[in-house]
Image: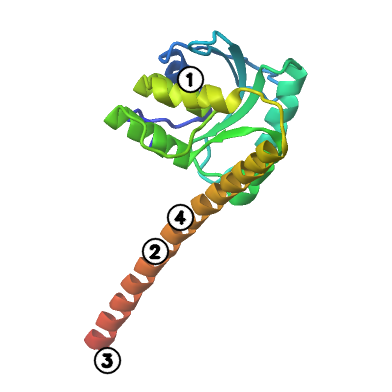
């Protein structure tokens, strides 16, 4: 999904993420043992503004969807390592995150890069352009910007991240953005469940077909 390289362990996944981020001109390194919930620390300098951001990353290489646990761990670990406003907690997984996990992460301000985000990264790598109507801030937005070298998208990110005085109109805008974000998570969950339902339907039809054939042969 995210690489042609065969990865068979969490350690290899962490190494891949470090190489991937460093290949995009960021400075990423593993924390080693006793990591306090943080596997990788990544320093990134925002284009144009020169703002330095520190991403504290927990990697989860799983054969099942991630739960709320790594979200809580990376949130706690980030605030232990760095109490400044430039510290951003991130969970990166090869699998998916349920709506409940994503909603919990959104409330804590933890970014998740999971199956749908990797699909978007893969699309941008293939087409060398960003087609999503959603403006992603955080680590994902920076990754997409660097891959596509899209200055227009970067300008949108910087606009999203620029603090402004909040009046009634701006408050309504923030509430709408929050609701759109939640709607996006619902759509991701719906797409996953539709795909799962389709696979179960195909399996059921296959079993029915086998049963009919056996009935005809031995009936």
Distance CA(mark 2)–CA(mark 3): 31 Å
55 sits left or right of 27 in the view: right
Is residue 68 visible from the viewing direction of this image? no
Mark closest to the chain's N terminus, 2 or 3: 2
Q: Quadrant of residue 71?
A: top right
Q: Closer to the camera: disc 1 or disc 3?
A: 1
The label number, if any, that marks residue 213 in the structure image: none
Residue sitting at x 43%, y 26%? 153
Q: Where is residue 59 in the image (x, y as percent from the top left)?
A: 57, 29
Distance CA(mark 3)–CA(mark 4): 41 Å
Residue sitting at x 45%, y 13%? 22
Circles 1 and 3 in contact, beta carbons < 8 Å: no
Camera-side residue: 77 or 32?
Answer: 77
Q: Position of residue 12 (x, y in %)?
A: 47, 24
9 sits left or right of 206 in the view: right
Distance CA(mark 1)–CA(mark 3): 58 Å
Q: In which quarter of the image is the N terminus?
A: top left
Distance CA(mark 2)–CA(mark 1): 35 Å
The label number, if any, that marks residue 198 in the structure image: 2
Residue marked by disc 4? 191
The label number, if any, that marks residue 219 in the structure image: 3
Q: Residue furthest bottom?
A: 219
């Amino acid at each position: 999904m995210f690489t042609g390289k065969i990865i068979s362990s969490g350690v290899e996944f962490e190494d891949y993420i470090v190489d991937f981020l460093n290949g995009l001109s960021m400075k990423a390194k593993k924390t080693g043992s006793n990591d306090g919930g943080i596997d990788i620390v990544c320093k990134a300098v925002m284009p144009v503004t020169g703002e330095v951001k520190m991403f504290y990353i927990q990697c989860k290489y799983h054969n099942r969807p991630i739960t709320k646990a790594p979200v809580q761990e990376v949130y706690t670990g980030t605030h232990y390592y760095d109490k400044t406003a430039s510290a951003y907690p991130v969970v990166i997984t090869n699998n998916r995150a349920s709506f409940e996990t994503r909603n919990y992460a959104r409330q804590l301000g933890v970014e998740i890069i999971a199956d749908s985000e990797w699909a978007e990264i893969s699309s941008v790598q293939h087409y060398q352009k960003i087609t999503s109507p959603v403006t992603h801030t955080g680590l994902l937005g920076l990754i997409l910007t660097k891959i596509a070298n899209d200055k227009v998208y970067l300008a949108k990110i910087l606009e999203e991240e620029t603090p402004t005085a909040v009046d009634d109109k701006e408050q309504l805008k923030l509430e709408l953005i929050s609701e759109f974000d939640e709607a996006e998570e619902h759509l991701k969950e719906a797409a996953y469940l539709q795909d799962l339902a389709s696979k179960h339907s195909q399996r059921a039809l296959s079993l029915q077909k086998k049963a009919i054939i056996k009935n005809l042969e031995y009936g």
